[in-house]
Amino acid sequence: MDAVIDFLNTIFWGYVLIYGLLAVGVYFTLRLGFVQIVHFPEMLRSVLRSNDTDKSGITPFQALCTSLASRVGTGNIAGVAVALTLGGPGAIFWMWVVAALGMATAFAESTLAQLYKVKDDEGRYRGGPAFYIAHGLKASWAGGLFSVCLIISFGLVFNAVQANSIADAVEGAFGVPKLGTGLVVAVLSGVIIFGGIAAIARTAEFVVPFMALAYVGLAFYALATHISLVPSVLGHIVGSAFGVGAAAGGVAGSVAAAMMNGVKRGLFSNEAGMGSAPNIAAVATPDPHHPVSQGFVQSLGVFIDTIVICTATALLILLSEVVPSAELTGTQLTQAALEVHVGWLGRYFVAIAIFFFAFTSIIGNYSYAENALVFLGHGHVSGVIVLRIALLAMVIWGSLQSVATVFNAADASMGLMASINLVAIVLLSGTVTRLTKDYLAQRKAGTEPVFVADEMADLPPGVDRQIWSRK
């Protein structure tokens, strides 16, 4: 079994997804006219508005914070450090490039999630890749397979991984037994997820901005206290990406190593194209009343995750002048860097940051899994309760165990899930293009963009026209 799982992961993560995610990012960037760069101000405009008249969904800001809760995890702390160790400073440049391309992919998949969303039996919005695969491509079997993979990876196993990271960090910094940490995280998670997606969104709305601002604030402190080093550090990042100057800090700091590690870190961190964030994008009530507005919101999420938070970690490490090595990497490297900036408080800050980053990932991941469960027809009370109990059990188990086979199986599951999603959004790219042109044409004409399904000629079947009527 291990050999089969390792083979699948080699295929998915060594070839299909690395090149597939990049290719799809380039494709949507070109086809949509660099929408993520040219219309960046539209992202801010879309996220800060809220339609108080439609109570079926959460606000755009809550949707952004919930997706960031899942996107921003321990990889933003430990993963960036590993990329620096293996690829040198140049890895950060390629991480930026991947994020810029991923913003277009995130825009496309979240726009589709909004377009094909539905209402459940309680009148709440539901949607995501499974829904646009089933309704847009008439491939319910693929939507079902996608949903099963999402529940296995994001709903269960990845939450065990996050719990394991929390337990390790808290035990190392404060000496708290792992079981105690696991039980506390399970109780806190249970209080929130048993309140449903609305409770998750409200929690994320307050916790995510706090944790992000605190972490980025520390990076700004490091910038301010080492301001004379900033130009040389930025120059070193760009130069190392193209092999200019010594690739200091990298065990294998060649151009190829910088590119590969930066690309992988960027792809794994921001999740653009994976099909995860669209599950919460679909739940939002967009303002303006147009699917494209949520595309802009989730594109901003990729920017914040990678360009802002991952870069904060990179600068904290590079400005500390701590030299990465095979022995000093991951969380330990970030802790060593922070101890240079803030002394003994550094390792405690990292432990607290890991707690918040990983904890919010757990509740954010659950929101995705619940949508997948609804698609599979098990979104009734008993089905949801079983999922919640299973998630909490995985949190406790994960705090105590680190079983490579289980985690590798989840990676393979996510690889299949992401592959299905990439094919789907490319096949539906014509719809994304039409919606984007419609939105931007209305903006250019000086009117508030509004999407009305009955007014768009030749609209593909599967769209709920009652949801997309004139409000």
Image (tube, rainbow, N blue to C red):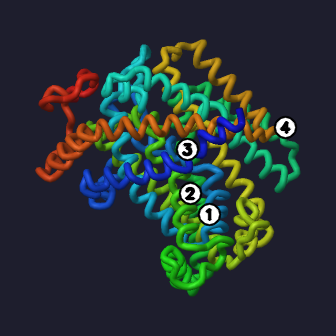
Mark found first going from the N terminus, 4 or 1: 1
**Which amino acid lies under the numbered mark 2 shown in the image of this protein?**
Arg
Position in image of residue 374 (x %, y %): 48, 20
Q: CA distance from mark 4 to mark 3?
A: 36 Å
Q: Residue at x 40, y 20 (%)?
A: 140
Image: 147 above or below 39: above
Which of these two is toward me, 28 or 174? 28
Q: Tally the marks.
A: 4
Residue that numbered label 2 is attached to = 265
Secondary structure at numbered mark 2 = helix
Quadrant where the N terminus is found in the figure: top right
**Which amino acid lies under the numbered mark 4 shown in the image of this protein?**
Leu
Position in image of residue 198 (x %, y %): 51, 30
Mark found first going from the N terminus, 3 or 2: 3
Q: Residue at x 79, y 45 (%)?
A: 167
Q: Residues within 10 Å of mark 2 (few under 14, many from 20)?
A: many
> Which one is closest to the eye, mark 3 or mark 2?
3
Q: Decide: marks 1, 2 in contact (CB < 8 A)? A: yes
Position in image of residue 90 (x %, y %): 54, 72
Q: CA distance from mark 1 to mark 3?
A: 21 Å
Which of these two is toward me, 231 or 80? 80
Secondary structure at numbered mark 3 = helix
Residue 83: numbered disc: 1
Residue that numbered label 4 is attached to = 179
Q: Residues within 10 Å of mark 3 (few under 14, many from 20)?
A: some
